[in-house]
Amino acid sequence: MKKTVSLILIICIGFSSKCLAEELIWYVASSMLTPAKKVTELFNQQYKTHRVLLITGGSGQLLSKIRLSKKGDIYSPASRHYLEESKKKGLSKKHTVFLIQTPVFGLSKNGVQKISSFSDLVSPGIKISVGNPQTMALGRLYLKIEDKMSSETKKGIRNNTTVKALNVAQIANYLKRNIIDAGTIFNTVAVAYKIPYIEFPKDVNITSELFWIELSTGNKGPTVALFKSFVNGNITKFTEHGFSLPQDFEGKK
């Protein structure tokens, strides 16, 4: 037992910055994982006494994890619905609109050969994946977009839908593996995964807001503020991946 304790002490002395680092947990919608990972790694390299841990998934999945674990400092869902849900459940201390992204239909290698316009999505034999509205923000958002389509288009896409995914990363993987022809993703995910895509008609599409929510399950306000300032100072990590900034973005001069 004494040897075990001594070994732990030696490890902590040798890696004191990691042992003493104050950890933040950031729940990140999967559509923003790639740039979030980059900025987090940069922060962890620069600030040895602080460390940010990323947890990713569908916005609804993440909210369930927060409720069950009662742990976490920051939550970034990809729709206002999950902001409102976090407020109803007493999980949101304060929030801001963080980023904006746009839904598109990503195409696989097979899909590119079959689909050249939005109207092609209703052609017989096209395999489509959309998001599960119970687990991901884009699933809920797509239902609102669908309501603005003509009944013929809505029916045609539904007839061609073969799978409902848990999160947007799952749809991106289906596309990369050629399992489906087309799937609902965000323009930002298309950039991150290098996926070709077609746009929704402007009269039916709805942009998606991502939020920076400080959670009531966390009590590290100064460290959260430090990290938020760092993220805002490196916001190009996100805009390089197709994200837009809200008009009142805090990092603007």
Image: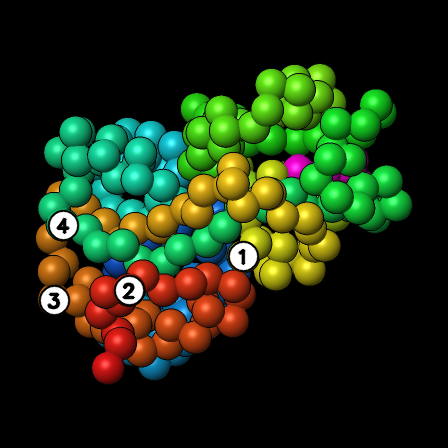
Marks 3 and 2, Cα distance to the nearest angstrom? 25 Å
Label 1 vs label 2, nearer the camera:
2
Label 3 vs label 2, nearer the camera:
2
**Residue at figure coordinates x 36%, y 41% from the top left:** 79
Task: Pick whichever, 18 or 28, lies toward us.
Answer: 28
Q: Quadrant of residue 89?
A: top left
| Residue at mark 2 | 247
Is residue 33 inside the magenta stretch?
A: no
| Relative to 90, residue 41 above or below | below
Q: Secondary structure at mark 3?
A: helix
- Please rate how many residues cluster around mark 2, counting C-alpha atoms within 10 Å: few if below 14, some from 14 to 19, many from 20: few
Colouring scheme applied when the structure was drawn: rainbow
Label 1 vs label 3, nearer the camera:
1
Q: Secondary structure at mark 1?
A: helix
**Residue at figure coordinates x 24%, y 82% from the top left:** 253
User: Where does the magenta region start and end?
Assistant: 178-183
Q: Are marks 1 and 3 in contact (CB under 8 Å)?
A: no
Please tell me the numbered disc located at residue 94.
4
Label 4 vs label 2, nearer the camera:
2
- Please rate how many residues cluster around mark 3, counting C-alpha atoms within 10 Å: few if below 14, some from 14 to 19, many from 20: few
Marks 1 and 4, Cα distance to the nearest angstrom? 25 Å
Type of amino acid under label 2: Gln
| Relative to 41, residue 198 above or below | above
| Residue at mark 1 | 188
- The mark nearer the N terminus, 1 or 3, is 1
Type of amino acid under label 4: Lys
Q: Is residue 8 visible?
A: no
Please tell me the numbered disc located at residue 144.
none
Instruction: Kindly report the secondary structure that dominates the magenta region of the rendered protein.
Output: loop
Please tell me the numbered disc located at residue 222.
3
Give x and y (percent) for residue 217: 16, 43
Q: Is residue 98 visible?
A: yes
